């Protein structure tokens, strides 16, 4: 799976989470996720709601009003099994 935030590809950390740093002044970002298999679908969920499943990619505008924004990307394969992947979008001034 590929995940991009504002057209920048994000790599998955060792803990399985995608950590995204954004400028402190940003109020929103665009999160895009793509699956590589033809039978899989992807949806994106944040505090403002979620998209419906789509294939092979999906995009959602993410509100960054909070200092840390959690986003869940769910992939459903052709057999109907779901896997959830988490992205944490953090404003740069709040990184420790």
Image (cartoon, rainbow, N blue to C red):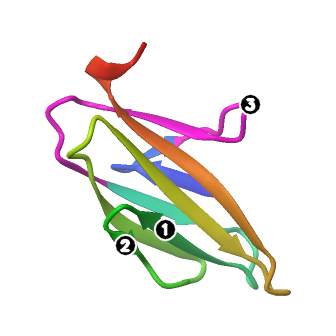
Height in image: 75 above or below 91?
below
Task: Find disc 2 in the rendering and name its residue.
Answer: 49
Q: Residue at x 48, y 41 (%)?
A: 88
Q: Position of residue 53 (x, y in %)?
A: 55, 83
The disc placed on residue 44 is 1
Cα gap from disc 2 to disc 3, whole angstroms: 27 Å
Q: Residue at x 26, y 42 (%)?
A: 66
Q: Left or right? Give the position of 69 relative to 28.
A: right
Cα gap from disc 2 to disc 1, whole angstroms: 9 Å
Secondary structure of the magenta portion, mostly?
Answer: loop
The first of marks 2 and 1 along the sequence is 1
Foreground: disc 2 or disc 1: 2
Q: Left or right? Give the position of 61 relative to 15.
A: left
Magenta part of the chain: 10-29
Quarter holding the N terminus is bottom right
Task: Find disc 3 in the rendering and name its residue.
Answer: 14
Q: Residue lying furthest top in this view?
A: 96
Element type at marker 1? strand
Quarter holding the C terminus is top left
Density class for disc 1 (Cα within 10 Å; few <14, some 14-19, many ≥20) is many
Element type at marker 3? loop
Q: Residue at x 41, y 69 (%)?
A: 59
Foreground: disc 2 or disc 3: 2
Q: Position of residue 60 (x, y in %)?
A: 36, 67
Q: Please tell me whether residue 19 belongs to the stretch shown in magenta.
A: yes
The first of marks 3 and 1 along the sequence is 3
Element type at marker 2? strand
């Amino acid at each position: 799976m590929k995940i991009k935030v504002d057209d920048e590809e994000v790599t998955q950390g060792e803990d399985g989470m995608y950590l995204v740093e954004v400028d402190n002044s940003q109020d929103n970002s665009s999160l895009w996720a793509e699956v590589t298999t033809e039978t899989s679908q992807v949806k994106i969920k944040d505090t403002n709601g979620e998209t419906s499943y789509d294939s092979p990619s999906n995009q959602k505008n993410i509100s960054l009003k909070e200092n840390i924004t959690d986003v869940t990307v769910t992939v459903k394969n052709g057999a109907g099994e779901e896997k959830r992947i988490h992205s944490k979008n953090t404003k740069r001034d709040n990184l420790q």
